[in-house]
Image (cartoon, grey):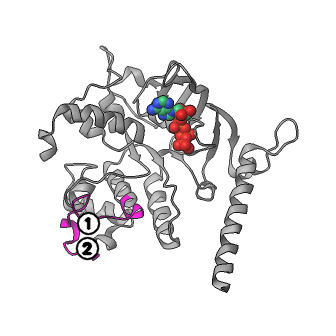
Amino acid sequence: MMQLYTPLHWFGTYYRMIQSNFVDMEKMLALFEVEQSVKDAPDAKELVIKEGHVVFENVTFCYDNRQTALNGISFSIPKGATVALVGPSGGGKSTILRLLFRFYDPASGRICIDGQDIRSVYQSSLRKSIGVVPQDTVLFNDTILYNIRYGDVNADEEAVIKAAKAAQIHDKILSFSDGYETKVGERGLRLSGGEKQRVAIARTILKDPPIILLDEATSALDTTTERQIQKALSTMTKDRTTLVIAHRLSTIINADLILVIKDGTVVETGTHEELIKKMTADGQQGVYSEMWQKQLHDENEDQSDTIHESDT
Ligand code: ATP
């Protein structure tokens, strides 16, 4: 609760950091009523989610007047589907997630959830319906129990443990000296990237939102951790509409739909199987197919480096 007494100007700075890093801090924003760049409409209503059907209709957005970040993006994600966003750096993937979370409003076009334009609903009701798992989760300097319960402050300990089990982090927590009472964060036990991400997954499972935004970790994880994370993610995303920014294509081959985002537009769409066969109109390899080949090539190089190292 110490954070309550921190000067407000700090939150202005922090809010901008949250916008750019997409940290899961929506409740904190509400708590401190930080001056935000988007406002609720005077006649705003509660968002009513029946299915979690997300639609982007010709969405355009610029951070400043110099460059267009999104240039007429349209797509539709049916209830419970997982859509992966891939593409070169700076293409607009994070911007899509930021707009759906309503950190900013589109310059033109609209974003709807179950037919409701997200500009017409309370931000609080929108953010209550969306769970965010960022690449790098910020933990509070508090117990691991507190950090998971942050997903639903009214949850009892049993529910927290159930979420931790589903997120594949329970056994790890029990190995800490004080179990769920272990202090974590900057001033406590430092967790690894893979552990922090599983805490974020446990938080989101506890929050139980119909829509999930996931920014996959870029860093390579060891095989066991990778397997645990994948298992946790598939539990979390089951029956929930999910948008995932994927940095490693191998993790999204089972996505219901892949959107290839480049220069603020959707340049290719399809499943993994469809996209690896895709050619451009002038007979060149498609963007996804080229990315896939490059990733396979890089993985082979890494493996042969390992073999050579073990030869020496
Ligand atoms: P990456 O894979 O590197 O995370 P991305 O596909 O998520 O990239 P975005 O972060 O959405 O791309 O960026 C889209 C464009 O908007 C880029 O040209 C980027 O430089 C610009 N941009 C992103 N954030 C901001 C910001 N806060 N202010 C100004 N421009 C920004």
- Which residue is farthest bottom? 311
Q: Which mark is residue 176?
A: 2
Q: Amino acid at mark 2?
A: Phe
Q: Which mark is residue 189?
A: 1
Number of callouts: 2
Residue in the image at 56% along x and 50% along y: 246
Local packing at callout 1 (Cα closer than 10 Å; few below 14, some 14-19, many 20+) is some
Q: Amino acid at mark 1?
A: Leu
- The answer to whether residue 1 of the structure is visible from this angle is no
Confirm whether the magenta stretch covers residue 308: no
Query: Foreground: 115 or 11?
Result: 11
Q: Which mark is residue 16?
A: none
Coordinates of residue 256 in the picture (x, y in percent): 61, 48
Q: Are marks 1 and 2 in contact (CB under 8 Å)?
A: yes
SS at circle 2: loop
Coordinates of residue 194 in the picture (x, y in percent): 42, 63
Local packing at callout 2 (Cα closer than 10 Å; few below 14, some 14-19, many 20+) is few
User: Mark 1 or mark 2, which has the lower sequence index?
Assistant: 2
Residue in the image at 69% along x and 79% along y: 308
Q: Is residue 4 left or right of residue 265?
A: left
Q: Is residue 76 left or right of residue 269?
A: left
- The answer to whether residue 217 of the structure is visible from this angle is yes
Please, is residue 17 above or below residue 182 in the view?
Answer: above
The magenta segment? 175-196
